[in-house]
Amino acid sequence: MTKFPLVIMTPTEVVFEGECEILTFRTPEGWMGVLAHRAPLIALLEVDEIKINMGGGQQEYLLIHGGLLQCDGERVVILTGEVEKPEEVDVDAARKAMEEAQKALSMVESTKDRARAEAELQKATARYRLALRRTRRIGGR
Protein backbone atom coordinates (compact mmCIF):
# COMPACT_ATOMS: atom_id res chain seq x y z
CA MET A 1 0.00 0.00 0.00
CA THR A 2 1.25 3.51 -0.79
CA LYS A 3 2.40 5.62 2.15
CA PHE A 4 2.09 9.35 2.72
CA PRO A 5 3.90 11.78 5.05
CA LEU A 6 2.16 12.56 8.34
CA VAL A 7 3.10 15.34 10.75
CA ILE A 8 1.38 15.82 14.12
CA MET A 9 2.28 18.93 16.06
CA THR A 10 1.30 20.94 19.11
CA PRO A 11 2.21 24.60 19.64
CA THR A 12 5.45 23.51 21.34
CA GLU A 13 6.66 20.38 19.50
CA VAL A 14 6.41 17.99 16.60
CA VAL A 15 4.98 14.87 18.22
CA PHE A 16 5.05 12.56 15.19
CA GLU A 17 6.68 12.82 11.80
CA GLY A 18 6.75 9.77 9.57
CA GLU A 19 5.18 7.71 6.84
CA CYS A 20 1.66 6.35 7.15
CA GLU A 21 -0.53 4.00 5.07
CA ILE A 22 -3.85 4.72 6.77
CA LEU A 23 -4.82 7.38 9.28
CA THR A 24 -8.10 7.06 11.19
CA PHE A 25 -9.59 9.92 13.25
CA ARG A 26 -12.89 11.27 14.57
CA THR A 27 -14.56 14.48 13.45
CA PRO A 28 -17.85 16.00 14.66
CA GLU A 29 -19.49 14.14 11.76
CA GLY A 30 -18.02 10.76 12.74
CA TRP A 31 -15.00 8.55 12.04
CA MET A 32 -12.96 9.16 8.89
CA GLY A 33 -9.82 7.80 7.34
CA VAL A 34 -7.13 9.01 4.97
CA LEU A 35 -5.18 7.02 2.41
CA ALA A 36 -2.41 8.24 0.12
CA HIS A 37 -3.47 10.61 -2.69
CA ARG A 38 -6.74 11.51 -0.99
CA ALA A 39 -8.59 14.54 -2.29
CA PRO A 40 -7.74 17.70 -0.34
CA LEU A 41 -9.47 17.92 3.02
CA ILE A 42 -9.62 20.16 6.06
CA ALA A 43 -11.33 18.60 9.07
CA LEU A 44 -12.05 19.60 12.64
CA LEU A 45 -10.89 16.87 15.04
CA GLU A 46 -12.71 15.70 18.13
CA VAL A 47 -10.97 14.77 21.37
CA ASP A 48 -10.32 11.08 20.74
CA GLU A 49 -7.76 8.54 19.64
CA ILE A 50 -6.22 8.56 16.23
CA LYS A 51 -4.86 5.38 14.70
CA ILE A 52 -1.70 5.58 12.61
CA ASN A 53 -1.21 2.46 10.49
CA MET A 54 2.38 2.54 9.26
CA GLY A 55 2.22 -0.76 7.38
CA GLY A 56 3.87 -4.07 8.08
CA GLY A 57 1.62 -4.58 11.10
CA GLN A 58 2.92 -1.44 12.83
CA GLN A 59 0.28 0.77 14.41
CA GLU A 60 0.41 3.65 16.81
CA TYR A 61 -2.42 5.21 18.78
CA LEU A 62 -2.34 8.76 20.09
CA LEU A 63 -4.92 10.80 21.96
CA ILE A 64 -5.56 14.10 20.20
CA HIS A 65 -7.15 16.89 22.24
CA GLY A 66 -9.13 18.27 19.32
CA GLY A 67 -7.53 20.25 16.56
CA LEU A 68 -7.37 20.58 12.82
CA LEU A 69 -6.36 18.12 10.10
CA GLN A 70 -5.18 19.36 6.71
CA CYS A 71 -4.61 17.03 3.77
CA ASP A 72 -3.37 18.45 0.48
CA GLY A 73 -3.43 15.15 -1.41
CA GLU A 74 0.24 14.46 -0.78
CA ARG A 75 0.69 14.81 3.00
CA VAL A 76 -1.36 15.20 6.17
CA VAL A 77 -0.70 17.70 8.94
CA ILE A 78 -2.51 17.63 12.29
CA LEU A 79 -2.41 20.70 14.53
CA THR A 80 -3.61 20.10 18.08
CA GLY A 81 -3.30 21.67 21.49
CA GLU A 82 -2.16 18.48 23.20
CA VAL A 83 -1.24 14.88 22.39
CA GLU A 84 -1.03 11.95 24.79
CA LYS A 85 0.72 8.64 24.17
CA PRO A 86 -0.45 5.35 25.72
CA GLU A 87 2.62 5.10 27.96
CA GLU A 88 1.84 8.53 29.44
CA VAL A 89 -1.60 7.54 30.77
CA ASP A 90 -2.06 5.60 34.02
CA VAL A 91 -4.85 3.03 33.62
CA ASP A 92 -6.16 3.29 37.19
CA ALA A 93 -6.16 7.09 37.19
CA ALA A 94 -7.86 7.14 33.78
CA ARG A 95 -10.54 4.68 34.94
CA LYS A 96 -11.17 6.76 38.09
CA ALA A 97 -11.44 9.98 36.02
CA MET A 98 -13.92 8.26 33.68
CA GLU A 99 -16.05 7.06 36.60
CA GLU A 100 -16.01 10.55 38.15
CA ALA A 101 -16.98 12.10 34.80
CA GLN A 102 -19.90 9.65 34.50
CA LYS A 103 -21.04 10.56 38.01
CA ALA A 104 -20.72 14.30 37.33
CA LEU A 105 -22.75 13.93 34.13
CA SER A 106 -25.57 12.20 36.00
CA MET A 107 -25.78 15.14 38.44
CA VAL A 108 -25.86 18.12 36.05
CA GLU A 109 -28.93 20.27 35.77
CA SER A 110 -28.24 22.97 33.18
CA THR A 111 -27.64 22.55 29.47
CA LYS A 112 -24.34 24.42 29.74
CA ASP A 113 -23.11 22.15 32.53
CA ARG A 114 -24.28 19.07 30.60
CA ALA A 115 -22.17 20.03 27.57
CA ARG A 116 -19.10 20.46 29.77
CA ALA A 117 -19.73 17.18 31.56
CA GLU A 118 -20.22 15.33 28.27
CA ALA A 119 -16.94 16.75 26.95
CA GLU A 120 -15.12 15.69 30.12
CA LEU A 121 -16.61 12.19 29.86
CA GLN A 122 -15.55 11.93 26.20
CA LYS A 123 -11.99 12.92 27.10
CA ALA A 124 -11.83 10.62 30.13
CA THR A 125 -13.20 7.66 28.15
CA ALA A 126 -10.70 8.23 25.33
CA ARG A 127 -7.82 8.43 27.84
CA TYR A 128 -8.96 5.17 29.45
CA ARG A 129 -9.16 3.37 26.07
CA LEU A 130 -5.69 4.66 25.20
CA ALA A 131 -4.28 3.45 28.54
CA LEU A 132 -5.85 0.02 28.00
CA ARG A 133 -4.05 -0.26 24.65
CA ARG A 134 -0.72 0.04 26.48
CA THR A 135 -1.62 -2.65 29.00
CA ARG A 136 -2.70 -4.99 26.22
CA ARG A 137 0.57 -4.34 24.37
CA ILE A 138 2.52 -5.20 27.50
CA GLY A 139 0.43 -8.30 28.09
CA GLY A 140 -2.33 -7.01 30.34
CA ARG A 141 -6.08 -7.34 29.72
Image (tube, grey):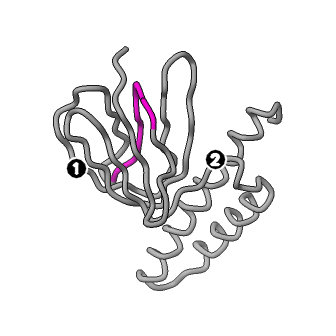
Residue 21 highlighted magenta (yes or no): yes
Please name the amino acid that badge 2 sits on: Leu
Image x and y of residue 122, in percent: 53, 60
**Residue range highlighted in magenta:** 18-27
Q: Is residue 104 above or below residue 30?
A: below
Residue 101 at x, y percent in the picture: 63, 69
Calculate the distance from the C-alpha at mark 1 to the C-alpha at mark 2: 25 Å
Which residue bears the numbered disc 1? 42
36 or 100, nearer to the observer: 36
Q: Residues within 10 Å of mark 2 (few under 14, many from 20)?
A: many
Q: Quadrant of residue 135?
A: top right
Q: Secondary structure at mark 1?
A: strand
- Quadrant housing the N terminus: top left
Prevailing SS of the magenta stretch: strand
Residue indicated by mark 2: 130
Question: Does label 1 or label 2 sit earlier along the sequence?
Answer: 1
Under mark 1, the amino acid is Ile
Q: Nearer the viewer, residue 35 or 119?
A: 35
- Residue ID at (27%, 51%): 43
Magenta stretch holds residue 4 = no
